[in-house]
Image: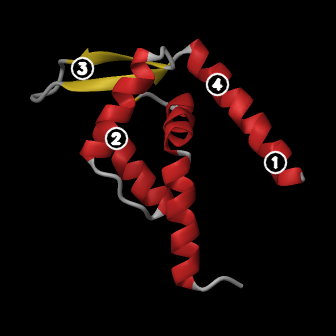
């Protein structure tokens, strides 16, 4: 059994290496704003990635066409809400298939 320290180290390394895929996976179930994504990563993986990591990655994913966004102006402070696109779903499906094959070997 891995020690707590080693578990945290492995979790951090996996989350960092697969951060774009993690974001796509979150957005496959619901649209979210950036702070929600940061919070969900911390909740699910116990790792904190701040705005300086998450927002540039969101911008890159949007430029690649994997996610889209729109502004929610209904709040006191407008929020940019991100959603998964069809291309993003294709990337996510391919990645999940690839990871499954790797884990089987």
> Residue 9's mark?
none
> Residue 72's mark?
3
> Residue 102's mark?
1
Marked residue nearer the N-terminal end (3 or 1): 3
Marked residue nearer the N-terminal end (3 or 2): 2
Work out how far the residue at label 4 is from the one at label 1, CA to CA, in angstroms.
Answer: 16 Å
Look at the image and tell me whether residue 33 can be seen: no
Residue indicated by mark 4: 91
Work out how far the residue at label 4 is from the one at label 3, CA to CA, in angstroms.
Answer: 26 Å
For image coordinates 62% across by 22% down, the residue present is 89
Figure check: 19 above or below 65 = below
Q: As drawn, is 13 to the left or to the right of 60?
A: right
Work out how far the residue at label 3 is from the one at label 1, CA to CA, in angstroms.
Answer: 39 Å
Q: Which of 34/57 is in front?
A: 57
Residue indicated by mark 2: 54
Q: As drawn, is 11 to the left or to the right of 40?
A: right
Marked residue nearer the N-terminal end (4 or 2): 2
Quadrant of the rendering where the N terminus is positioned: bottom right
Determine whether label 1 and label 2 are within 8 Å by CB: no
């Amino acid at each position: 059994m891995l020690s707590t320290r080693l578990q945290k180290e492995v979790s951090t390394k996996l989350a960092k290496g697969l951060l774009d895929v993690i974001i796509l996976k979150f957005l496959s179930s619901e649209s979210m704003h950036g702070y929600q994504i940061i919070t969900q990563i911390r909740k699910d993986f116990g790792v904190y990635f701040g705005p300086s990591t998450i927002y540039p990655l969101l911008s890159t994913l949007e430029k690649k066409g994997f996610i889209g966004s729109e502004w929610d102006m209904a709040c006191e402070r407008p929020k940019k809400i991100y959603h998964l696109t069809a291309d993003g779903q294709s990337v996510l499906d391919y990645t999940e298939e690839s990871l499954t094959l790797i884990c089987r070997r």
